[in-house]
């Protein structure tokens, strides 16, 4: 006996030919919205495993509704101590490596299992949604829901959502061929009720600079974006282990995010393309006027390329 | 001297209760460590753990369905080679040993599943890997604010390109 019985459901999901029909748009939108609502309105506490490239991490996570938002805590339980804490006001990352502690403010409060945007219905314009059977994750029955891109500009997800609550228990990021790029999967979860909440106050370190401030004057123009993408952030910020300030722009279709970093070009910039080993992360560095532009994201190459080639200096 | 801080005494002679208490997270850290040590050394005890898994009520579905007879052995052998997976047992008192065991088993199972999945080869042709490495971690870390929040060091390949030529 081999691992075949374990592989079967995953391979079935990633097979090119899928028997399940794509849901009509209204029904698909309702599914996505239900999943989105569940991940942001339901208290939870558990352990999940993240598999990305050749790396596997186990993390504990908890969340509880706080007004119309969530308070949550994400904590790595292997490797370097890494913790993300979020409340409606602020989100911070604490990383301890050896005797060094690094504290950074995050610009966003979301993390797994909160994958879908608050308003999830528009995703059906860019993704097909179809159910693909059921499974069992972390001891709970769940329905597989495939969220597959309609074009080459985004990756897809295969979610397994709790049959009762629609809470995401497993999420597999897949490429256009249905091959897995990254996977989150709960090993233990307790849904509903009141999770144990870290009552410690949010850490405040006075020497930590403000994470970001809005970009006052855009120095480049984006002439065209891949369909469905819009700019959701444009801030001036400092990066860890990186000299000087950069402009950080973020473009998203609600599920796929791509970042653009702009900084002064101190010397002529070669156009360099980068790609992670499994192709999940794509990036490009190029010169735009007197700036170095770095476009990077967990997105297919056409998305990164389209964004990079649409940049032009602004007078 | 064994502590008696849980509702169950740790049964040196009663492996059934020890396993049950372990999977229920009712052992102290030292008790859990002892039980895991016994599991490592005792094939019969591992077989009993497999039976428990087959019942499906201990590991919350991880062993649900048709359990491969050698699955638990594979898992335990893997655990023997992965001592760091047991490191969480040394964590803050009050954490549930069963939880960590479940996490360790899932890590192993996940590793098994993914290691059998078809690897995507590098999309870039080998001849194109001609650019010096670039430190993308600062950018990737900042991007995580809007992405996964969890950073894994990215193994990137770099190549010089002409955007005009590479456009579709």
Image (cartoon, coloured by chain):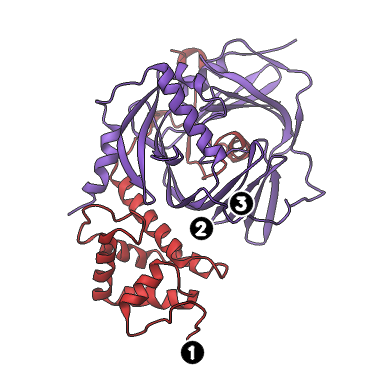
Q: Nearer the viewer, residue A147 or B118?
A: A147
Q: Which chain is red?
A: B
Q: Chain of mark 3?
A: A
| Residue found 50% across the figure and 22% down from its top | A121
Query: Disc 2 on helix, strand or loop?
Result: loop
In percent of the image, x 31 and y 75: which residue is there?
A: B16
Q: Are marks 2 and 3 in contact (CB under 8 Å)?
A: no
Asked if badges 2 and 3 are on one and the same chain, I answer yes
Q: Residues within 10 Å of mark 3 (few under 14, many from 20)?
A: many
Frontmost residue, A107 versus B116: A107
Query: Which residue has dot 1 on it?
Result: B1
Q: Which residue is mark 2?
A: A78
Give the residue furthest to the bottom.
B1
Mark 2 against mark 3, which lies toward the viewer? 3
The color chain A is rendered in: purple
1 and 3 marks in contact (CB < 8 Å): no
Give x and y (percent) for residue B73. Answer: 26, 65
Q: Is residue A96 above or below residue A178?
A: below
Check the image and report above or below for B11 versus B62. below
Q: Is residue B85 visible?
A: no
Tell me the quadrant of the picture where the C terminus of chain A can be found.
top right
């Amino acid at each position: 006996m081999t691992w075949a019985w374990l592989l079967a459901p995953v391979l079935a999901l990633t097979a090119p030919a899928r028997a399940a029909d794509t849901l009509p748009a209204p029904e698909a939108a309702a599914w996505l919205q239900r999943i989105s609502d569940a991940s942001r309105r339901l208290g939870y506490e558990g352990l999940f495993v993240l598999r990305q490239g050749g790396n596997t991490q186990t993390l504990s996570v908890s969340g509880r509704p706080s007004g119309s938002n969530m308070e949550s805590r994400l904590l790595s339980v292997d490797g370097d101590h890494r913790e993300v804490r979020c409340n409606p006001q602020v989100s911070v990352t604490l990383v301890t490596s050896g005797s060094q502690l690094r504290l950074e403010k995050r610009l966003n409060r979301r993390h797994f299992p909160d994958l879908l945007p608050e308003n999830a219905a528009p995703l059906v314009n860019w993704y097909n949604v179809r159910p693909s059977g059921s499974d069992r994750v972390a001891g709970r029955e769940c329905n597989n829901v495939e969220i597959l891109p309609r074009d080459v500009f985004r990756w897809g997800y295969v979610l397994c959502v709790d049959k009762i609550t629609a809470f995401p228990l497993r999420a597999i990021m897949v490429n256009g061929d249905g091959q897995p790029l990254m996977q989150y999967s709960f090993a233990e979860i307790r849904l509903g009720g009141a999770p144990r909440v870290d009552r410690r106050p949010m850490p405040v370190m006075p020497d930590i600079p403000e994470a970001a401030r809005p970009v006052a004057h855009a120095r480049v123009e984006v002439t065209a974006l891949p369909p469905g993408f819009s700019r959701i952030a444009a801030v001036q910020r400092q990066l860890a282990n990186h000299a000087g300030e950069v402009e950080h722009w973020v473009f998203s279709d609600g599920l796929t995010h791509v970042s653009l970093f702009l900084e002064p070009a101190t010397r002529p910039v070669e156009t360099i393309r980068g790609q992670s080993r499994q192709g999940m992360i794509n990036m490009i560095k190029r010169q735009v006027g007197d700036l170095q532009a770095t476009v990077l994201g967990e997105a297919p190459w056409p998305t990164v390329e389209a964004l990079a080639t649409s940049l032009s200096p602004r007078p | 001297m064994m502590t008696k801080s849980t509702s169950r005494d740790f049964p040196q002679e009663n492996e059934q209760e020890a396993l049950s208490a372990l999977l229920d997270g009712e052992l102290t850290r030292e008790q859990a460590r002892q039980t895991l040590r016994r599991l490592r050394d005792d094939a019969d005890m591992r077989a009993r753990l497999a039976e428990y898994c087959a019942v499906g009520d201990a590991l919350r579905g991880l062993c649900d369905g048709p359990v491969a007879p050698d699955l638990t052995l594979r898992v335990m052998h893997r655990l023997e080679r992965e001592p760091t997976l047991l490191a969480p047992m040394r964590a803050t008192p009050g954490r549930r040993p069963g939880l960590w065991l479940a996490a360790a088993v899932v890590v192993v199972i996940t590793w098994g599943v993914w290691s059998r999945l078809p690897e995507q080869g590098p999309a870039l042709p080998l001849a194109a890997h001609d650019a010096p490495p670039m430190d993308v971690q600062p950018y990737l870390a900042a991007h995580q604010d809007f992405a996964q929040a969890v950073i894994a060091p990215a193994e990137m390949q770099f190549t010089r390109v002409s955007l005009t030529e590479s456009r579709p």
